[in-house]
Image: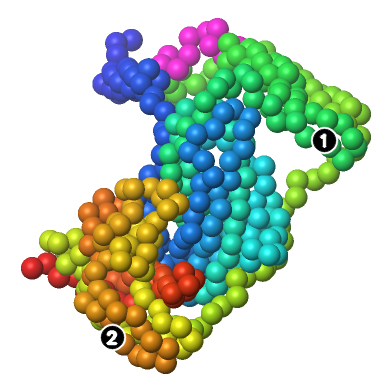
Amino acid sequence: MKNSPIISKIKKWSAIGFTVAIAAGVYSPMASAHGEKSQPAFMRMRTITWYDLKWSTDKVKVNDEMTVTGKFHVFSGWPETVRKPEVAFLNIGIPGPVFVRTSSHIGDGQNMMFTPRSVSLELGRDYDFKVTLKARRPGRWHVHTMMNVEAGGPVIGPGKWVEIEGNMADFRNPVTTLTGQTVDLETWGLGGVVRWHLFWYIVGIAWIWWWYRRPALLPRFSRVSAGNEEGLITDTDKKAAIAFGAATLLIVLFGYTSANGEFPITVPLQAGVIGYPPVLAQDKKIDVYLERSEYRVPGRQMAATLRVTNNGDAPVQLGEFQVGPIRFMNPSVAKDESGYPESILAEQGLVLEDNSPIAPGETKTLKVTATDAAWENERMTDLIYDPDSRFGGLLHFKDQGGKTYPVEVGGPIIPVFG
């Protein structure tokens, strides 16, 4: 039987698919960052804003620990298109298991709740957090803060490059179980996993061989297309299928009973929501009302008019404006000393028409501009193309004693193209 046009096309596309698969296997570069810039601007601005971040180090050795600490603000104007953080999980964004997360805490600094599972977060509130990581795989990796929100996806915060030195073969991750046994989670049970995988690979290959020992695929396809499928599956094939199925059930039953016999004491994986962690006390000493905001596209500049009232007992000045991960600093008031990533730190980016302090009881109109290429580099300007063109951020005011007062600000933003 000569090749029909359909069979020729199948052969052609099979060859193309095989070539693409081989090429993809040969060239598969390792991911080192997380594509956080691909997240919508409104999600990075108006969900969770991370601030006062500190990475304890930017260079560790295998088995050494590092911590990521700071605060995060849950925006009160949470987007309607993202489910509210009633089930949220504090995590760290890294390219695979290059670190092991040994602990995480959320709270108010004095009362930190251990959070190995999901928690519920309140809108408009601030939290302290601390995550401890243990270095596992050598390399240079981007380490992000991250909050996973149920049905909302991961909210990725700022990331910093951290270098791990040493040999992965030296990594150890010992834990003591509830029965007093100490095991290394890096290798414990690995032999059994490998053996069972190899066994089922052999079973799978035997099953495939049974059907491929005779002409398959194209000859069978030709017979089915011609309506001559009678006899393709023989009585012997049916008996073999029954034997494979019965053997599989027996082997699974054997594995189940032997595992129960070897490990009679087990604890289910813990799930569910722990509850509400303690929140940072709210300080209502400063009220901010947004009168107008616009983004000038050619200049990569946001301009806002703010009416600020100081209800405290000490003069304050605006030291920083944070939009998503980008920090625009007022150099005459505030300076970053935490080693924040330079690509998202605009040290000279915030300019005020009137930079004088706001006295206690005074209400002042501030005209501020935030200018930096990070608007474009971080793709935060995409907000002007959203159906709901709104921004969100934090204003950090400082008093003479150095105390910082973060205040949420947000509202419509008007694009200016000229």
According to the image, label 2 marks what residue? 365
Q: In front here: 418 or 10?
A: 418
Q: Residue at x 32, y 72 (%)?
A: 390
Q: From the top left corner, tell me how far across and down residue 211 is, in percent.
A: 57, 14
Side of 116 where 33 appears, left or right:
left
Mark 1 vs mark 2, foreground winner is 2
Residue at the top extreme of this rendering: 213
Q: Quadrant of the N terminus?
A: top left
- The residue at which mark 1 appears reads as 176
In the image, which residues are magenta?
A: 210-219
Percent x, y for residue 126? 55, 69
Q: Is residue 215 magenta?
A: yes
Q: Is residue 135 above or below residue 400?
A: above
The answer to the question of whether label 1 and label 2 lie on touching residues, with beta carbons closer than 8 A, is no
* Distance of label 1 from label 2 (alpha carbons): 60 Å
Q: Nearer the viewer, residue 192 or 55?
A: 55
